[in-house]
């Protein structure tokens, strides 16, 4: 199994909305803690170390493109 | 010229000296001070160290005096998070760990050493210069009687983290220094905590930091308080600073005010630590073992235990080289195998330290998220790292390993330490597998007889119901079927075990040619 990067959401817009709403009223610190918990929950759900490494690399590459 | 001079009579130097002397070598062991470490220093001695001490004739004494334990518990604030059992299966002679003050370990080893006439221990001998040629090493030593010169074929530096030998040779041990301070206090008291390793993150009695509590013999308790990088080490060493910290813990643990035990402070120290190692553990005729070669943080009991395993890895190899049974290059495998093991220990120790002392703001965010989730979700508890406790490294990829030709469903791959199991001797006595292994190579064969002229002990393992002749001394009955399970034994299966009890080859059917070739490989004759 490798990281799915083609569209895979059952309801993309709905997910995005609840993601943003979940952060409502949180301070930056609370949002950061929330994100960390979310990453850990999702990472355990994925489980496969190979897939997780691919995701980390993909996220890191994106960041370096955005930050000059 | 002396065949072997060992420098440093701590647990590592003593282990090495005894092992070599038991093998018949003449050994000189130099120590700059007198016997006995001050304070208790290392306290957790692992199952593997105990198995090594068994081979050296002093394991039982350590176990009798030590506090045996297998279970650890982790707490977050005032709530238990989870517990772990380091030896969840029965059928092992030794527990996962004993806690025993280093000064007892050194005393018992020194008393064992004193019984070996070919082991010459010289206290108050300090090395001040070292040089080597292709053929010999020359040491200058300050003694109470003045300066002396010693020549040796091989020198082993077991002289600790601030190794004099390493400094005299201009060598370094490098790595990461962690920006945190810990107070370590040994406290004498009658307390009712169980015989378990207890670790708190952010407890009410020492907020925002971690605390470790451990029982030692003689009603001594080891308490480790994380202090943070800003703590003043000189101030924190003072009893008036230490006593309130201990009182806070005891008041927290007590049922009521009346049951808070009285205590006396036996020893205390404030320390920082580094994970580091030398680039190479061998420099010509000088070899490095234990803390002189590598250092780790204490949260995994990987310091003294890995040093003791260095010693046992080196002892049989030095013996074989000095007897011309193996080329000098066999000693290169000491360096490569134990550097590999050191890297594994450093990796585990660094990970635990990064969890206990997060090194960046985001690292702290994730650490706290793990602890937060661990209260509710079992998956997060697997990430909680209060120290991954010492297990022997499996020497994957060692050049001494015979690559598997057959398929096995067992953890006993070439490079792993042979697992213990209960056995019944041919005369009906119940015993354990590991003590049946002699000082040389051993071939364990399951359900078949084998005779060989090769220099190797043969142990024939038979199932409970197999026909055996009570007169045969080399037959072991696997009366709990645990050897069969742990080694995936089938009739004819054979394991070749090195003198340091590591598996180096295994076959479904062994032939004299295969055995010869594996022995040559393990003795470095075919490299």
Image: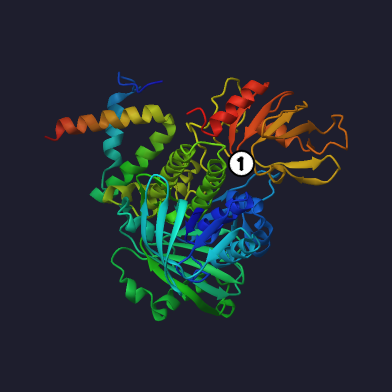
Q: Given the image, what chain letter belongs to the residue carrying mark 1?
A: B
Q: Nearer the viewer, residue B176 or B88?
A: B176
Q: Nearer the viewer, residue B257 or B10?
A: B10
Residue B269 location, x and y as percent?
Answer: 41, 70
Q: Secondary structure at mark 1?
A: loop
Residue B403 location, x and y as percent?
Answer: 54, 25
User: Which residue is located at x 28 percent, y 30 percent?
Assistant: A57
Identify the image's colour scheme: rainbow, by chain, secondary structure or one colour.
rainbow
Q: Nearer the viewer, residue B184 or B128?
A: B128
- Seen as rendered, the residue at the extreme front is B1
Q: Is residue B163 visible?
A: no
- Seen as rendered, the residue at the extreme top is A6
User: Which residue is located at x 59 percent, y 30 percent?
Assistant: B519
In which quadrant of the rendered view does residue B508 lie? top right
- Seen in the image, is B67 located left or right of residue B77? right
User: Which residue is located at x 49 percent, y 71 percent?
Assistant: B39
- Seen as rendered, the residue at the extreme left is A68
| Residue B359 to residue B450: above or below | below
What residue does disc 1 label?
B499
| Residue B252 to residue B171: above or below | below
Q: Neighbour class for label 1 at 10 Å: few (<14), some, many (≥20)?
A: some
Q: Is residue B483 visible?
A: yes
């Amino acid at each position: 199994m490798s990281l799915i990067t083609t569209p895979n959401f059952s309801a993309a817009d709905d997910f995005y909305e609840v993601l943003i709403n979940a952060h409502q009223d949180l301070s930056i610190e609370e949002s950061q803690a929330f994100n960390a918990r979310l990453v850990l929950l999702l990472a355990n759900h994925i489980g496969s170390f190979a897939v997780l490494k691919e995701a980390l690399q993909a996220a890191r590459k994106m960041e370096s493109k955005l930050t000059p | 010229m002396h065949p072997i001079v060992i420098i440093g009579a701590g647990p590592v130097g003593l282990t090495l000296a005894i092992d070599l002397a038991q093998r018949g070598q003449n050994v000189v062991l130099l120590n700059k001070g007198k016997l006995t470490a001050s304070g208790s220093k290392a306290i957790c001695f692992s199952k593997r160290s105990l198995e090594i001490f068994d081979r050296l004739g002093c394991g039982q004494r350590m176990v009798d005096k030590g506090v045996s334990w297998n279970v650890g518990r982790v707490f977050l604030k005032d709530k238990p998070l989870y517990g772990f059992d380091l030896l969840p299966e029965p059928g092992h002679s030794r527990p996962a760990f004993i806690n025993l003050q280093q000064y007892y370990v050194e005393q018992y080893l020194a008393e064992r050493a004193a019984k070996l006439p070919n082991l010459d221990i010289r206290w108050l001998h300090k090395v001040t210069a070292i040089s080597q040629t292709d053929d010999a090493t020359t040491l200058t030593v300050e003694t109470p009687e003045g300066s002396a010169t010693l020549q040796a074929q091989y020198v082993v530096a077991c002289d600790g983290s601030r190794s004099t030998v390493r400094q005299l040779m201009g060598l370094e041990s490098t790595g990461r220094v962690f920006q945190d301070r810990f107070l370590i206090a040994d406290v004498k008291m009658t307390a009712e905590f169980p015989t378990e390793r207890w670790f708190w993150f952010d407890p009410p009695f020492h907020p925002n930091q971690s605390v470790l509590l451990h029982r030692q013999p003689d009603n001594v308790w080891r308490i480790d308080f994380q202090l943070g990088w800003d703590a003043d080490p000189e101030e924190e060493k003072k009893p008036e600073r230490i006593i309130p910290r201990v009182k806070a813990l005891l008041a927290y643990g007590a049922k009521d005010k009346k049951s808070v035990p009285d205590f006396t402070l036996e020893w205390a120290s404030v320390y920082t630590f580094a994970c580091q190692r030398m680039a190479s553990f061998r420099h010509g005729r000088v070899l490095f073992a234990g803390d002189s070669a590598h250092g780790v943080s204490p949260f995994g009991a990987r310091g003294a235990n890995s040093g003791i395993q260095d010693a046992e890895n080196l002892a049989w190899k030095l013996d074989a080289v000095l007897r011309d049974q193996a080329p000098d290059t066999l000693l290169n495998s000491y360096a490569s195998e134990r550097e590999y093991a050191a890297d594994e220990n450093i990796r585990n120790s660094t990970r635990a330290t990064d969890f206990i002392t997060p090194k960046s703001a985001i690292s702290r965010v994730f650490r706290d998220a793990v602890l937060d989730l661990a209260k509710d979700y079992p998956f997060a508890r697997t990430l909680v790292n209060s120290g991954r406790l010492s297990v022997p490294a499996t020497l994957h990829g060692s050049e001494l390993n015979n690559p598997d030709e057959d398929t096995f469903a067992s953890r006993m791959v070439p490079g792993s330490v042979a697992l213990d199991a209960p056995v019944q001797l041919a005369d009906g006595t119940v015993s354990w597998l590991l003590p049946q292994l002699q000082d040389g190579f051993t071939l364990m064969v399951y359900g078949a007889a084998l005779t060989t002229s090769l220099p190797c002990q043969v142990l024939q393992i038979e199932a409970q119901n197999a026909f055996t002749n009570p007169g045969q001394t080399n037959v072991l009955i696997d009366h709990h079927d645990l050897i069969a399970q742990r080694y995936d034994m089938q009739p004819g299966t054979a394991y070749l075990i090195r003198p340091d009890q590591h598996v180096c080859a295994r076959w479904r059917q062994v032939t004299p040619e295969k055995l010869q070739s594996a022995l040559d490989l393990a003795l470095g004759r075919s490299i």
